[in-house]
Image: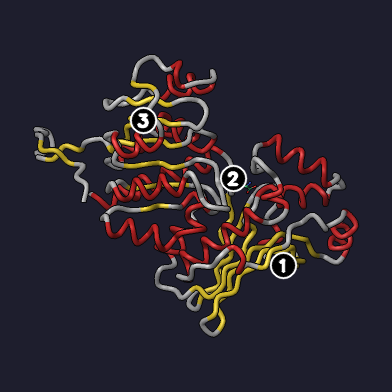
Amino acid sequence: MLLFAKVGSNLLTGSLIERMAHKLALIGFGTVSQGLAKLLMEQTESIKQQGAEFQVVAIATNSRGSVFDPDGLDLKAALKAVQSGSLDNYPGGEKGWDSLKIINESNADIIIENTLTNLDDGEPALSHFKAALQQGKHVITANKGPVVLAYSELMNLAKANNVNLLIEGTVMSGTPVLNLSHFGLGGCNIHEVQGILNGTTNYILTQMETGMSYDDALKQAQELGFAEADPTADVEGWDALAKVVILASVIMGVDLKVSDVDREGITNISIDDVEKAKADGKRWKLIGQVKKENGVVKASVKPMLIPLSDPLAAVGAAMNAITFYTDVLKSVTITGAGAGGPQTGFAVLSDLLELHRSES
Ligand code: HSE
């Protein structure tokens, strides 16, 4: 187990333990990790109140360089440098370390992996995860690729190396659905999960109800920054499928393959379909579903007509929601943000605090 404590003295409290900062390396510095960097600056006081301190010692990007300083980076300067085009513009630190060198050789004890999601082979993130876990470093991520493709293998690797892999940001960004299922609903048997898991498609369907065309609504979602780099991943249901696979692993303990999930996107839904649903007191929603029946887990992503009495029908724009169907509490629905830099950065921060609590 990694040690975060050093012996010191604090005459006011009489405590003999003075906490050292957790040292972080950010692998990937796009919207999510930039969102995290801003939160680390803005929320310093509330982080301190929880007895934690986080110091970023390294940042690596795919095409905008890297920087490493074992004594900690100035996040404001790092954000300014990357926004100016390259971390080479950061004043100080060592430049030119690649992601694997940072993972293997830097003094970071927590690796924040947020490179681009790749559902084909999970790379380069999968190699980053494995290297970090093998080095006895914790991994926190919002990257769905490796989690979808190798959840059990990675969890076993983390366990074997006595570290944690935390993935709250992979489903519904900062809205705490995985932690809710694990902690809050830990005493229940969850037999079905049904949700709106993709903000872009929900935004498009909501706008189409006001008469906007599919193309204009998609364009707006792209401008607002919810859509994936290739929006096919959203509108054809791949992004929601990835989240369904993760929910099946985390909640049902079953590793599904991408090909096990029935998938249909929203591209066949016309304005006429949306208007007819409205006239019938219903709404089209792209629903991800995982269901356990007689011990068999089945999963799907498809557009469904939802009656207005269902809490999911009221979830508009880019919001997401999940209903957990349980034995004790029956249905529990949580609604919240499902995308966005600050929101997903917040999921990473909540995992950092969880890691800190588990080690205190
Ligand atoms: N493109 C995704 C969405 C982002 O629209 O929900 C979060 O995975």
The disc label shown at residue 309, or none: 1
**Residue identified by numbered label 3:** 58
| Mark 2 CB near ligand 1 (8 Å cut) | yes
Q: Earlier in the sequence, mark 3 or mark 2?
A: 3
CB under 8 Å between discs 2 and 1: no
Residue 123 vs residue 224, the one in the foreground: 123
Name the residue: 40% across, 32% down. Answer: 98
**Residue identified by numbered label 2:** 339
Q: Secondary structure at mark 3?
A: strand
Q: Quadrant of residue 240?
A: bottom right
Amino acid marked by disc 2: Ala
Q: Which of labels 2 and 1 is toward the front? A: 2
Q: Disc 2 and disc 1: Cα gap in Å?
A: 25 Å
256 versus 321 height, above or below:
below
Left or right of 251? Residue 338 is right
| Mark 2 Cα-neighbour bin, 10 Å: few <14, some 14–19, many ≥20 | many
Residue 114 vs residue 202, the one in the foreground: 114
